[in-house]
Amino acid sequence: MATGYVFHEQLMWHDTGPSADMMPPGRFVEPGRHLESPGSKRRLNNLIQVSGLSRHLVPIIP
């Protein structure tokens, strides 16, 4: 059984907005960058490429 992999730069063009983790931003909770950001997905894709893991995946074109 093969494992497919989807990645395209345009999939990163979204804005998750600010986050305060599990608490809503407010009087005592400062919002910050959301953990689920496009940057974290790009870093993961780069690791998949440089580690050689991508040779074992089936590319899926979006």
Image: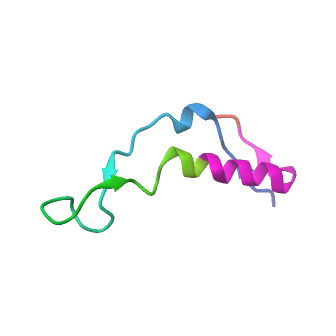
Left or right of residue 36, residue 23 in this image: left
Tell which of 21 and 8 is nearer to you. Answer: 21
Tell which of 59 and 10 is nearer to you. Answer: 10
Residue at the spot 34% in from the left edge and 54% down from the top edge: 32
**Residue 42 position in % (x across, y down):** 62, 45
- Magenta region includes residue 54: yes
Span of residues in magenta: 42-60
**Residue 39 position in % (x across, y down):** 55, 46
**Residue 5 position in % (x across, y down):** 71, 48
| The N terminus: image quadrant | bottom right
- Magenta region includes residue 37: no
Picture quadrant of residue 20: bottom left
Q: Report the predominant secondary structure element of the magenta stretch.
A: helix
Left or right of residue 26, residue 36 in this image: right
Left or right of residue 26, residue 20 in this image: right
Residue at the spot 48% in from the left edge and 49% down from the top edge: 37
Tell which of 46 and 30 is nearer to you. Answer: 30
